Structure formats: C-alpha cells, structure tokens
Amino acid sequence: MRKLLLVFALLAGAPAWTQRMRMEVTKPTTPQLDAKANDPAVPAGLAVSAQFGRIVIMRFKHQTDLLEGIEKLVREQRIRNAVILSGVGSVRNYHVHTVSNREFASKNVYTKDPSQPADIVRINGYVLGGKVHAHLTLADPDRAFGGHLEPATEVFTFAIVTLGVLDDSPDLSRFDDKTYQ
C-alpha cells in the first residue's frame, strides 16, 4: 500500500516537472558600463556593405537540439558571418528568452516548456564572428510567440534553416554588443 501511495504521489507531481517555466535574469555588464551615457563617437546607426558568397541550407532531424545543431554546422561550414534568412519546421519543446525591461542593467525572461510542441513559423538572426544569434517565432494552436533561441529547443518533425553567408572581411563583432553605445 505504501508503494502504491508513493507511485500516486509521484504521478500527481509529474505535470509540475513538465510545465512551462519562466524565470527573469538580470544581465549586467559592469555598473560603470550599465550606467554610462551614449558615446558621441559611436554612430547612432552603422552600415556595413557585404555580399552573399553562398547560401547554406541546413536540415535537422527529430530530437536534435536546434541551437546546438546550427552552431555545429556553422563551425563545420567555417561560417564567420551570415544572415539567417529563413527557418521552418516544428519543435517538441522550446526554450527562448525575451527582454523584459527598458533600462540598464538589462533583464531577460527565460521561458521553457519541456512538453509543449510548436510549429516554427520563422527563424531569423545572424552569425557574427562565428557566434549564432538566432531568434524564432513559434506557434501552437492558441498563439504565436517567440524570442531568442536558447539551448534545449528540440526538433520534432524536422527543421530547415537557410543562411546567406557573407565574406569574412566585415567586422560585425560589435553588432550585438549592448555596451557599444
């Protein structure tokens, strides 16, 4: 009887282990950088000209960690700079983050649901200096949502991601640096 009660207690608690979780995280740099004013020497907008050298189409199979898969193929294909042009497919679960405040230090809300499948409506972003900065839009039967792609977003049926690879000459390393202001 005790074992049976323990099994029922564990089963009753199981949904809590697989429900959507949200966590807010402050992303400070340093107090000095978070408090600094905009530097007039840093332009308000910055344009760099580049051309696509090639297009790389990536396909990921069932149960592949999507971010890890993109990072692996970027390394294997020796891609330093690229534009993520498109992405479609589906996921078994998701892990994303979105910004949650308007002042430095920046804060992000991480949302992770280990049991919720969704369609990939769109993937976009960049590869900057070999680092993947991907965002995705997902949809389930009730809503569309998304954010910055995080580890532990697992492919369901398949995922296809298309990159426009740029030449290596432009220095894009500061394009996603929040301290470059």
Image (cartoon, rainbow, N blue to C red):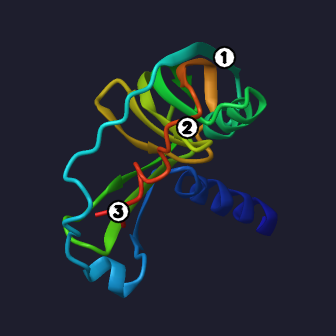
Reading the image, the residue beneath label 2 is 93
Alpha-carbon distance for marks 2 and 1?
18 Å
Alpha-carbon distance for marks 3 and 1?
34 Å
The residue at 28%/64% (across/down) is 181
Q: Secondary structure at mark 3?
A: loop
Mark 3 and mark 1 in contact? Answer it, CB < 8 Å: no
Query: Which amino acid does the dot numbered 3 rest on?
Result: Tyr
Kindly identify which numbered label has been placed on residue 59: 1
Query: Where is residue 180 shown, x and y percent of the image?
Result: 35, 62
Q: Residues within 10 Å of mark 2 (few under 14, many from 20)?
A: many
Reading the image, the residue beneath label 3 is 180
Q: Nearer the viewer, residue 106 or 17?
A: 106
Quarter the N terminus occupies: bottom right
Q: Secondary structure at mark 2?
A: loop
Query: Which amino acid does the dot numbered 1 rest on?
Result: Arg
The residue at 55%/37% (across/down) is 93
Query: Which amino acid does the dot numbered 2 rest on?
Result: Asn
Classify 36 as above or below 19. Answer: below
Q: Which marked residue is nearer to the observer: mark 2 or mark 1?
A: 1
